[in-house]
Image (tube, helix red, strand yellow):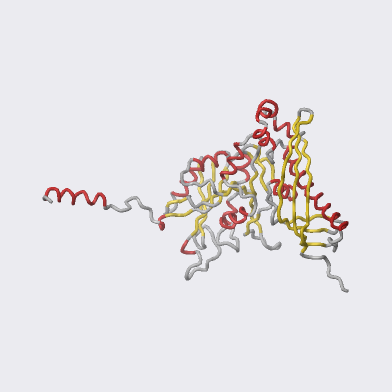
Amino acid sequence: MKKPALLFVLICMPVFLTGCWDRTEINDLAIVVATAEDKAGKQDYRVTIQAPLPSSMGGSGSSGGGGGTSGEGPFLVAQGTGKNLRQGVDDIQNRLSRKLYFPHRRVLILGEDLAKRGINESLNAILVEPQSRLSTFLLISKGDSLNTLKAQPRMEQFSGEAIREMAKARIEMTVRDVILDLERPGKEAVIPMVETSSLLSNEKSKTEIAMKSFAVLKGEKLSFITNDAETLGVLWLREKMAGKILTFPVIGIDEATVQIIDNNIKQKFAVVNKKPTFALSVRATGTLVNNEGNYRLEDPKTYHMVVGKMKKEIIKEIQSTINHAHSQGVDLFGFGWYLYRTHYQKWNTDWKNGWEYTLKDLKVSVSVDADIQRTTTSGNVEKE
């Protein structure tokens, strides 16, 4: 090879040997696992992030527990404010030495006040951010969402992981699921509620996480929060009662408790006097785990009596949920979405306009086919 050619090759080689010139080292990143968003006054937003601190997560010489905003525990909680959510994130970034990294975010928590004003801006912020994942679990907090990220649950190293595990055991509403429900005609979104709690009744500090209810939306805004019976009603309607507990009165003050093995629901539609009507058929099977009245289920009459009480309780929970939602003009189950998919022409011409008012008079019947397949207790211990 001639010297000019060799010289040209030697000059060009460094261009192809630059390596990862735009690399970002992992120790230059703050990996965000959870974020919380709240309204700060009428115009501003408050954004909170939670990021693990690897050097404090149980390694050699580390206590591995607790947490806080100063870096003394296994996670960092930082907060920023701005006129919009992006400014809130930038406010945090300006005070951190590491770059915020969102692809591993597991949960997004929206404050109750923000949800009442509308969640569209929070969802849009995710859609326009390339790092965000639609598989992130979406929750709404009672009060400010900041408190949930500052909690220090004992069973997990940081609250974001505890919230994710609990969300998986409920109805698993991701950002994608909520966006789809908001876009579906005749259906509203239902999102789990999260709040701080404690494991002992006499504990003043609330360091644990609890999920006891659901936030029911009307459009993009929070309409109402379910009570205990309505929470179970939502789980029945979403076919998520498997593994959950159902307690119901039998005779007097005696109660029975059944752990649900499986449940499913089917709907039938009919037009009566030019108005839509629906019939829901619920199938539920379970195991008797508590028998205060010491009822002998091997006796057919006793069995049918106890199962009859179980059916009555299930119907009450479902009906109370549907009635409350429909009184608010909220299609929680998605009856309108069913009509849109199966009777589009009729939906578009007769029912689409004014559907929220039609809901208030919509007739929905509920029937239950229940079965207690086995027992784990016969009730009180009796001497022979």
> From this viewpoint, which residue is outermost toward the top?
349
Residue at 78 percent across and 31 percent down: it is 272
Position of residue 159 measured from the top left corner of the image (x, y, whole percent): 57, 57
Q: Relative to 257, does residue 351 appear above or below in the rendering? A: above
Q: In which quarter of the image is residue 275?
A: top right
Q: Relative to 121, does residue 290 appear above or below in the rendering? A: below
Residue at 69 percent across and 63 percent down: it is 200
What is the quadrant of the C terminus in the image?
bottom right
Position of residue 108 measured from the top left corner of the image (x, y, whole percent): 56, 49
Residue at 54 percent across and 48 percent down: it is 135
> From this viewpoint, which residue is outermost toward the bottom?
384
> Viewer-proximal residue, 111 or 248?
248
Query: Residue 53 vs residue 22: left or right?
Result: right
Q: Relative to 165, does residue 340 appear above or below in the rendering? A: above
Position of residue 369 measured from the top left corner of the image (x, y, whole percent): 78, 49
Query: Residue 32 vs residue 137: left or right?
Result: left
Q: Can residue 223 be seen in this view?
A: yes
Q: Is residue 252 visible?
A: no
> Viewer-proximal residue, 89 or 379?
379
Q: Quadrant of residue 201?
A: bottom right
Count of numbered circles on the image: 0
